[in-house]
Amino acid sequence: MTVLVIRRLMQSAVMLLAMSILVFLGVFAIGNPVDILISPQADQAEIARATAALGLDKPLWEQYFVFLANAAHGDLGRSFVFNEPALRLIVQRLPATLELAFSAMLLAVVLGLPLGLYVGLRPDTFLSRLIAAGSILGFSLPTFWVGIMLILVFAVWMGWLPSTGRGATVSVLGVDVSFLTWDGIRHLILPALNLSLSRIALVIRLAAAGTREVSHMDYIKFARAKGLTRGRVVRVHVLRNILIPIVTVLGLEIGAVIAFSVVTETIFAWPGIGQLIIKSITVLDRPVIVAYLMLTVFLVIMINLLVDILYSVLDPRVRLAEARA
Amino acid sequence: MSTFAEEQAREDAASIEESPLRRLAADFFESKLAAAGLVVLLAVVFVALFAPWLSPQNPYDLASLDLLDGRLPPGSTSAEGLVYWLGTDDQGRDMMSAIFYGLRTSLAVGALSSIAALVLGGALGLIAAYVGGRTESAIMRIVDLQLSLPAILVALILVALLGHGVFKIILALVVVQWAYYARTIRASALVERRKEYIEAARCLALSDARIMLHHLLPNCLPPVIVVATVQVAHAIALEATLSFLGIGLPITEPSLGLLIANGFEYMMSGKYWISFFPGIALLVAIVSINLVGDRLRDVLNPRLQK
Amino acid sequence: MSAAAPLLSVEGLATHFFTRMGVVKAVDGVSLSVRSGEVLGLVGESGSGKSVTGFSILGLVDPPGHIVAGRILFEGEDLARLSGERLRRLRGERIAMIFQDPMMTLNPVLRIETQMVEAIRAHHPEVSHAEARARSRDVLGQVGIASPEERLAAYPHQFSGGMRQRVAIAIALLNRPSLLIADEPTTALDVTIQAQILYEVQKLCRESGTALIWITHDLAVVGGLADTLAVMYAGRVVEQGPVDAVLDRPLHPYTSGLIGSVPSRNRRGEPLRQIPGMTPSPLRLPSGCSFRSRCPRADEHCLEMPELAALARGRLVRCVHPLTSEAP
């Protein structure tokens, strides 16, 4: 088990390094950020001074190593626009994004799993067909359009829920969270729903397909031949078997959800890292772009690793195969 | 032998003769929903292809626009008697025309990038499966790396690196998608490669390229077709998302995403139609593609045949 | 042998599958009976409907299949007409079943202990987990599994096929059912393991007085095991009787053909006899006797479906030209 973890950690480190080179080369080799910060009328001397101040005059590989060394110290450069350390900017806004992402995943499981199970067990009822059709819709609809529609319906037409911003926050262990206040929840519902819709559809489809497949297996028939109640057969025998692929996919999806939050945060003006990155790309605030990409890739890699570990915990066949290897 | 057994043999032979394509079509159309989806899709493609002839107004000919006609609700008429069926946007453009042209752009970008990704990914996947060894590991390692990152993140990275422009966005979309095609074709090709007809082709000393293209490729196609339909829908959605966020196609080539973005600010003041109708158009396009692709997947999957 | 009334009496069972391509009459006229403590061998080729018969008895036929006719009398109740909950209580408690493929019978993600304890507690919720566990361990030992205590904590894929089948048998016998239905349990196993399992099951059933229906296509297997034999063809029972009588003096031409096609030590050097033709597809059964297209004795009387009739004491046959006076 530990061998697995160490091996994957090393693979992840390599991947992270590769990403850093890629990102660095790309962002720093194209375009000239000086042009944004200096007025077009500046003369050569001013440009030269600004360039030197930002360290942009050194050769590329030297810049990269400086960058790496700084990164090891947690310094990923200062934002050109806000003149603050890029990493700090991002870390400040991270809790908001994580809160949104996890709420979305929670909704996906809580709503998607039971619905998917139902569709898998009784595929021919009207309700099943409705849910299945709905899931195709949920999967196809672009997130930003759903967000706009949600605002239109619930905020503009019905006036039930606020359309922008994050609600009142409470500090827990030094981190600001908003789901503990009623006002916070009111602000959280629409964006979380928006972000989760296509995941709910995904979970429904996975659960339905998994249930359909598992239901025909001999061991389910054997469980029924033992005289177990239907409830137990579904809860214990079916569920445990379909959870494995669902957990795997969901785990991998967390990364996508965090990445997709750029859309939801823009629409709902949610103060997370997604909103930040869009602005940064538009103005080419490179340190922030680099810091965001590095952090997100790091998060995604870590999550993939956790999912792999979780997978081997859930499926005993994998656990023992790895141990033998 | 009695005649009964002979009868049975004859019947069995007859059912084999029905062509697989006809069988496929018959299975496909069993689902009313998928059939409806196909009809809608064809209509959407038709509109996109013939947009310049179908639109009452050319929305990008600045001379034909009248700013005073801006933000009119659906159903209003212009000074010349032109009916704005879906209203106008802030520049006075007829929404319907703008949507037709926007559909054209969205579909074109989506389809183009998908085809390019298919060719690139397909080629690499086929090579990986056929050649094997180090080449295969190298290619698949890159594929896995890319697929472990969410598509939108990859798109963000590329857009941040490449900047704006139609060609650059298409390139970004191609890079996002090629990995899916590569993986699908490789998996398919690996299975086919072991089959005897490939061995037979090798014995005939046919060149590798010929074997790959003429023998291997046609048999790998079914899962690729399914992936392709889903990918086109994704590409369209992704491009719309990027354009909506302002980092996609430039204003000179407005896609539906940009139209929706334009209208977003007017939503609060009740002028919903500027965002709403382009959104519906986008929806219809994507959902119809997904319906068709979904049904294709069910029909082509041998395991689910009851 | 025991009292006159049979433990299980199946009368005219018909189970049809209503598929897109037509009605598959998997079982279309099965009558058989098993007495308490008796071993019945249900023999037939693949597709003859013997597995479906087994599932029908337990009510485990999934849609699009349904029992369309017949009675299944067990301990005074008609199983074909019982409610779902009543049937559930019988399954695993009074009637148990084991399946053909031991690799797929056990749930791969649950421990053996879980799968055994739940079988007990589903019918006896008052039994504590510890007690159920103890009983499970004991029964594992009875079916010949060494170190049962450690084995309880293991997962199915850590067992070989033969051992998994033993576990399945153990689970089936946990609640001391009066009837065990074994659906080709040794077909997927090695010949040596086959013999072991056969022996174990025989011994266990004799010891506990459990009646056994052993479904198989292998005549050689049932020869030494069963008390009574029932032969199935194309969804119908065509002959039933005491095992020695059926094997030595078969009445139905199909049974005779079946026996003749089994390689046997007694006839070394002689060519293997084959039954000409092929089993009809269950979608297109011929009218009348389903065997008539392959039977050397068929004539125009066979165009009508013969009834299962008693020819002698304890011997039933479905044929208008039975082999009454012929030697094998």
Image (cartoon, rainbow, N blue to C red):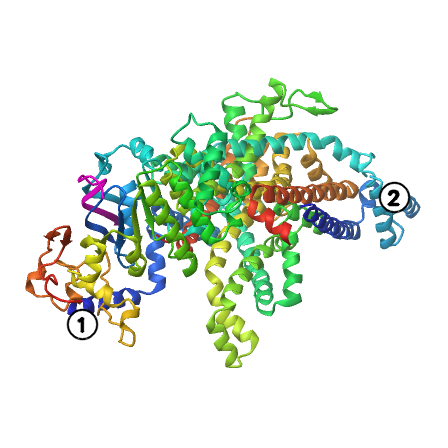
Q: Would residue B83 be seen by someone viewing this image from the given angle? A: no
Label 2: chain? A
Q: Is residue B7 above or below residue A134?
A: below
Q: Is residue C15 magenta?
A: yes
Label 1 residue SS: loop
Would residue A42 be found to the left or right of residue B32 on screen?
Answer: right
Give B30 or B94, whichever is nearer the viewer.
Answer: B30
Q: Is residue C267 magenta?
A: no
**Which quarter of the figure has residue A219?**
top left
Q: Residue, x 70% and y 35% (percent of image)? A: A273
Q: How many marks?
A: 2
Give C14 or B40, whichever is nearer the viewer.
Answer: C14
The residue at which mark 2 appears reads as A54
Label 1: chain? B
Q: Which residues are magenta?
A: C1-19
Q: Main secondary structure of the magenta part?
A: strand
Q: For the residues marked 2 and 1, what is the alpha-carbon distance in whole angstroms?
A: 94 Å
Disc 2 residue crowd, few under 14, some 14–19, many 20+, Cα 10 Å: some
Q: Would residue C181 be seen by someone viewing this image from the given angle? A: yes
Q: Residue, x 49% and y 22% (percent of image)? A: A158
Residue type of the residue flagged with mark 1: Met
Give A264 or C107, whichever is nearer the viewer.
Answer: C107
Would residue B105 be found to the left or right of residue C203 on screen?
Answer: right
The residue at which mark 1 appears reads as B1
